[in-house]
Image (cartoon, grey):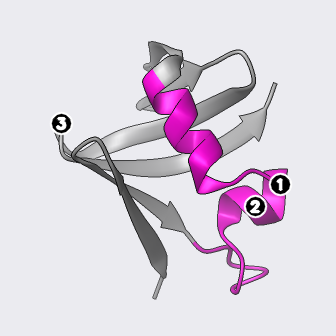
C-alpha cells in the first residue's frame, strides 16, 4: 500500500507519494532532490501544458518542472514528479 504526504496551499491539497525504494523519503526528494515547496511553487508560478500521451499536466517554472494530475478538480493535486530544470 502506498503512503502519501499531504500539504495544502491556497486552498489546494497536494499529495506527494513516498518512494518505493527509499520508503522514508518522498519520491520527488529520493529521485530528484526536490521538496514539496518546490513543486507547489512551480504549480502556482509556472506555465502548464497537457501531455496527452501520459495523461498529465506538465508545469514548468524558471527553476522546476512539475508533472501532476487532478484527483479532484480544483481541490486535490496528485504530484507525479518534480525536478530541477
Is residue 19 on the magenta stretch? yes
* Residue closest to the eye, 55 or 35: 35
Residue range (magenta): 18-44
Determine the image quadrant of residue 42: top right
Image position, residue 33 (x, y; %): 83, 54
- Apparent side of residue 75 relative to residue 40 in the rendered image (left or right): left
Q: Residue furthest front?
A: 10
First in residue order: circle 2 vs circle 3: 2
How many C-alpha atoms fall within 10 Å of the one at disc 2: few (<14), some, or many (≥20)? some
Q: Position of residue 21 (x, y in %)?
A: 78, 80
Q: CA distance from mark 2 to mark 3?
A: 25 Å
Residue 74: mark in rendering: 3
Give the residue pinned by disc 2. 29
Image location of residue 32, percent across then percent down: 82, 50
Q: Position of residue 6 (x, y in %)?
A: 40, 67
Are the residues at dot 2 and dot 1 in contact (C-beta closer than 8 Å)? yes
The numbered mark at residue 21 is none
Q: CA distance from mark 2 to mark 1?
A: 4 Å
Q: Residue at x 46, y 15 (%)?
A: 48
Number of residues whose C-alpha sits closer than 10 Å to that of mark 3, classed few (under 14), some (14–19) or many (20 or more): few
Tally of numbered tags:
3
Amino acid at each position: 500500500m502506498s503512503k502519501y504526504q499531504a500539504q495544502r496551499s491556497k486552498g489546494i491539497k497536494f499529495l506527494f507519494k513516498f518512494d518505493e525504494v527509499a520508503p522514508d523519503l518522498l519520491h520527488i526528494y529520493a529521485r530528484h532532490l526536490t521538496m514539496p515547496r518546490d513543486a507547489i511553487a512551480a504549480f502556482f508560478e509556472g506555465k502548464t501544458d497537457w501531455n496527452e500521451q501520459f495523461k498529465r499536466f506538465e508545469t514548468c517554472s524558471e527553476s522546476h518542472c512539475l508533472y501532476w494530475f487532478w484527483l479532484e478538480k480544483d481541490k486535490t493535486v496528485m504530484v507525479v514528479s518534480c525536478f530541477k530544470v
